[in-house]
Image (cartoon, rainbow, N blue to C red):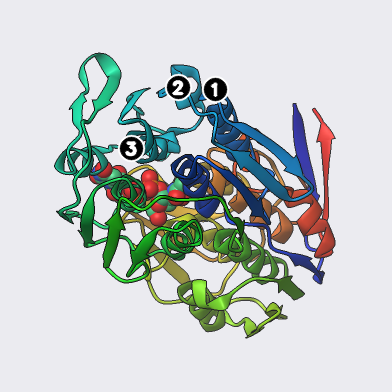
Amino acid sequence: MSRLLVYGRKQLRGETPIQGAKNSVLPILAATILTGDTVALQHCPHLRDVDISVQILRALGCDAHWEMDTLVVDTAGLKGWKISDILMREMRSSAIFLGAMIARCHQAELSYPGGCELGPRPIDLHLAGLRALGTDIDDSGGTLHCQTCGLLGRELVLSLPSVGATENLMLAACGAEGCTTITNAAREPEIVDLQDFLNACGAEVRGAGSSTVTIIGGKRLHGCTYTVMPDRIVAATYLCAAAAATGEIFLRNAKEEHLTTVTALLREAGCEIKNDTAGIACCCHRRLQAVGPIRTAAYPGFPTDAQAVLMAALLRCQGTNVFEENIFSNRYRHVDELVRMGADIRVSGRVAVVHGVEQLQGACVCCTDLRGGAALCVAALAAEGKSCIDQLRHLDRGYEDICRDLSALGADIKRVAS
Ligand code: UD1
């Protein structure tokens, strides 16, 4: 077990590269199953969720090994179609393997993903779409038994633009004969990355990034070498760190076009942000101003995954900020920990009202979930004195090495055994 020790109120100055995107690489790892071939994923982040995906692939009979920051996966030897309950519990988003396994093996068996730290995590839209493509699904007794005699492309309409359902159905549709359209698809940059990966393997997918994705299925896919996009939420975290602690930082590889709702609010709060092809520079030298209401929404709206880190950056601002969380029902668990540091936050249902305070005090706090944990790091950088942050397993799911990156940006932070 380890913990982070952070000494706050130190201006940041420095630069760091941005790791590959967790939310891109997880569906891409599931998609490797479709190729039955060797895929080299460059700029693949070393994360706990990636390790779990590798364990799933190995349990299914595939090979996977690391060569520096490249993960090489060979799915030629795939022989299983069941994911154990233990691995399902380790990573709720492992449901993303369903579409790929059904497309390749015509069957899949895995336990029903339950709720997670953010609230219920239903997969009804995934299942409805897979059924519409021709899968028989028996979901009795907490286990999903899926089988098909062959998938057939068709028009699918999502009742809400779910990221996971869009990805799962894209993967299944690659194995379906004929044309599938997904209407009201999620538009996140990670969906575009998945499309680009699939097309690099010989698939025919278009429209990702818009709300209609079209897949011409039944193509024989092959392996490829692919570079994973930079992680926009990690970039948002470090921009919020600079906003909270003040200073000047440069995030190499970060792409502002993926983050415009976040950078617009940081600019409104008083940060100077510039971007070029090499990355994003952020400069912040004064106390932040309160900004207009922050309402989380599906992309291109403000990302729910950046809600906690922006809240942390605004704890010491002048004025009052109102947050409205519209994607997950239990996404303010970091608030009680931030209050321990002296924050003034009132939560009522989906709304959190943050009154800026003059000063935050370092405290001993616990990560409650992945992005909530990142928010504690951001707040600790703005707080007087020492903070200790525990329960780092949450952070390790999505940040390759937040301590390394924030140190490179000039923060006084270290990871020690607890
Ligand atoms: C993905 C991201 C997660 C991010 C979220 C929203 C990955 C691995 N995770 O999660 O980091 O916070 O997008 O941007 O990419 N829903 C249903 N039925 C379904 C599917 C979803 O009701 O079948 C609801 C969910 O409960 C949630 C909302 O739709 O309220 C959005 O979920 P979704 O977009 O599916 O998120 P994930 O793919 O799980």
**Label 1 vs label 3: CA separation?**
24 Å
Residue 245 drawn at (x, y percent): 72, 67
Does the CB distance between marks 1 and 2 fall below 8 Å?
A: yes
Q: Quadrant of residue 251?
A: bottom right
Q: Quadrant of residue 192?
A: bottom left
Q: Is residue 348 visible?
A: no
Q: Nearer the viewer, residue 303 or 337?
A: 303
Q: Nearer the viewer, residue 69 or 216?
A: 216
Q: Is mark 3 within 8 Å of ligand 1?
A: yes
Label 2 secondary element: loop
| Crowdedness near tag 2: few (<14), some (14–19) or many (≥20) residues, C-alpha within 10 Å | some
| Crowdedness near tag 3: few (<14), some (14–19) or many (≥20) residues, C-alpha within 10 Å | some
- Which numbered disc, 1 or 3, marks the residue that appears first in the sequence? 1
Q: On the image, numbered disc 2 is attached to which residue?
A: 80
| Crowdedness near tag 1: few (<14), some (14–19) or many (≥20) residues, C-alpha within 10 Å | some
Residue 185 drawn at (x, y percent): 27, 60
Q: Residue at x 77, y 65 (%)?
A: 16
Residue 218 drawn at (x, y percent): 31, 50
Q: On the image, numbered disc 1 is attached to which residue?
A: 59
**Label 1 vs label 2: CA separation?**
7 Å
Q: Amino acid at mark 3?
A: Arg
